Amino acid sequence: VSVSTSGGSLVLTGATIETTMVDLTGVTAIEINGGGGSDKVTINSSLAQNVTLNVGEVVLNAPITGAVAGTATNVTVNPGGSVQNGLDVAFVDATINLAGATFSGNLVISKSVNLVGDNATTKLTASSGNVISLSGASFGGSNSVTISGIDFDGNAGAAAAGINVPATVSVGALSINNGDISGFSLYGVSVFG
């Protein structure tokens, strides 16, 4: 494992990064570059730093409050983790698995992904706005978003829509399977594009 620090940044690079302990005092950015698609990083404690995780698999058990990026093709978000962090660390066409729990919404999806819940036990909710909004210039006619096994709860009308696709977004396919959508003040699903 190569560990380097410079100007408040921490970079870990190597073919195998296992149980590497690093003091994060003064570190404002963390970058982990794995050696292959089978590398896995698990976040068990909250991080305030900007984090880039270029590894095959990421498990989120706690939130990251700084900016998040990465190239993970398989992401798991467990209770305590942030679904938006999972979306941000995911590579195009990645699968983001949500554990059976209730997660806060107001999420932005800006690339092709598969968002998979644990059927009747995974719920996304929001107290205002939309639970999920599709956004971004990276969408095009061939990009797709698949959402399965997730219930959407609008908090008795507090949230406007479960899923919102504005006219500015062109998406090839939006698939929603095996989930209930209820309790929104305007729409369960709104597609204006």
Image (cartoon, rainbow, N blue to C red):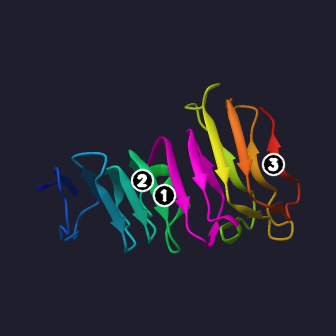
Q: How many marks?
A: 3
Q: Quadrant of residue 113?
A: top right
Question: Residue, x 66% and y 58% (percent of image)?
Answer: 106
Contact check, label 1 and label 3, Cβ < 8 Å: no
Q: Quadrant of residue 24?
A: bottom left
Does 10 sit left or right of 46 as displayed? left
Q: Which amino acid, mark 2?
A: Val
Position of residue 156 relative to residue 109, above or below, is below
Position of residue 57 relative to residue 136, above or below, is below
Nearer-N-terminus badge (3/2): 2
Position of residue 135 relative to residue 15, above or below, is above
- Residue 107 % position (x, y): 62, 55
Contact check, label 1 and label 2, Cβ < 8 Å: yes
- Which residue in the structure is indicated by mark 3? 189
Spatial CA distance of label 1 from label 2 is: 6 Å
- Residue 98 % position (x, y): 56, 63
- Residue 73 % position (x, y): 42, 47
Q: Which amino acid, mark 3?
A: Val
Question: Residue, x 24% and y 49% (percent of image)?
Answer: 34
Q: Which residues are magenta?
A: 90-119
Does 98 sit left or right of 73 as displayed? right
Question: Residue, x 32% and y 61% (percent of image)?
Answer: 41
Quadrant for the C terminus, please.
top right
- Which residue in the structure is indicated by mark 1? 85
Determine which of the numbered discs, if any, sits on residue 57 in the image.
Answer: none
- Which residue in the structure is indicated by mark 2? 68
Quadrant for the N terminus, please.
bottom left
